[in-house]
Image (cartoon, helix red, strand yellow):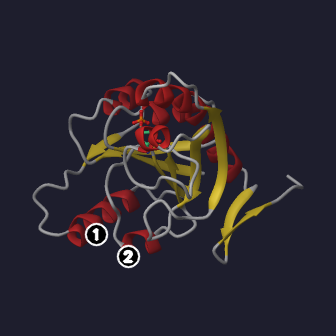
């Protein structure tokens, strides 16, 4: 399977996927921010990188159209969103239906959007975690593939909790990419299908 990873920043999930020795080909890492730290990490791994800034486009749709054209030059089987901090238009999402996944730092459907760790603490949650899901047009609402949970401790700060969740993100996301690459997990009629016989 050919994989394109989209990032906007640090790229630690991207790094975890690149270093997991998966039976896949990383066609490119694309960032919407030239200053994203993850770009250098990708280059150290010998992965082609590209930057397409959303600035200079006059609408979300025009940026998304250009982004899809760039992604498609790499002919990916799977598009992996790894801290890609852009809301995606419905047309873009439909174009990659069943072929695009995201990791979100909460136990969805709780805490879609930003500042998930602070919000989980404010609600007094005793469990928190991360979710990998197929991407659908509604933000952070796609069919859930896998989740990992962590305990919330009384003395947690958003930062300490984020760190505990991130450890799990780095285990969960490569595992899900592996399952999809092996054809063990797919999206069929809007539902996640898991094959037990592979
Ligand atoms: C992660 O917490 C991920 O769940 C969220 O954005 C963060 C990206 O971190 N979508 P990194 O760029 O992978 O280090």
- Check residue 91 in the rendering and tell me which mark sits there, or answer none: 2
Label 2: state its secondary structure.
helix
Q: Residue at x 47, y 36 (%)?
A: 14
- Check residue 65 in the rendering and tell me which mark sits there, or answer none: 1
Q: Is residue 82 left or right of residue 188?
A: left
- Neighbor class of circle 1 (other Cα within 10 Å; few <14, some 14-19, many 20+) is some
Q: Is residue 54 left or right of residue 168?
A: left
* Percent of width and height locating residue 196: 87, 55
Label 1: state its secondary structure.
helix
* Percent of width and height locating residue 193: 74, 65
Q: Pick out the residue farthest to the right.
A: 197
Between label 2 and label 1, give the one nearer the viewer. 2
Q: Is residue 117 above or below residue 85?
A: above
125 vs 47, nearest the viewer: 125
Q: Residue at x 54, y 51 (%)?
A: 2
Split into quadrants, the picture shows ligand 1 in the one at top left
* Percent of width and height locating residue 105: 50, 43
Q: Is residue 86 above or below residue 41?
A: below
Q: Is residue 22 visible?
A: no
């Amino acid at each position: 399977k050919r994989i394109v990873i989209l990032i906007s920043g640090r790229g630690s999930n991207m790094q975890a996927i690149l270093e997991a020795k998966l039976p896949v080909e990383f066609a490119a890492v694309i960032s919407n921010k030239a200053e994203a730290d993850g770009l250098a990490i990708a280059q150290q791994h010998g992965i082609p990188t590209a930057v397409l800034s959303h600035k200079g486009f006059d609408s979300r749709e025009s940026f998304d159209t250009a982004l899809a054209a760039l992604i498609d030059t790499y002919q990916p089987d799977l598009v992996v969103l790894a801290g890609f901090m852009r809301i995606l238009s419905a047309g873009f999402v439909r174009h990659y239906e069943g072929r695009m996944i995201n990791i979100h730092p909460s136990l969805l459907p709780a805490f879609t959007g930003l500042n998930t760790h602070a919000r989980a603490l404010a609600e007094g949650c005793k469990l928190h975690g991360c979710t990998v899901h197929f991407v659908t047009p509604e933000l952070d609402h796609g069919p859930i593939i896998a989740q990992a949970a962590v305990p919330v401790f009384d003395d947690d700060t958003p930062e300490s909790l984020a760190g505990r969740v991130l450890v799990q993100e780095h285990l969960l996301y490569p595992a899900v990419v592996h399952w999809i690459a092996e054809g063990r997990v797919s999206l069929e009629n809007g539902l996640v299908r898991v094959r037990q016989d592979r």
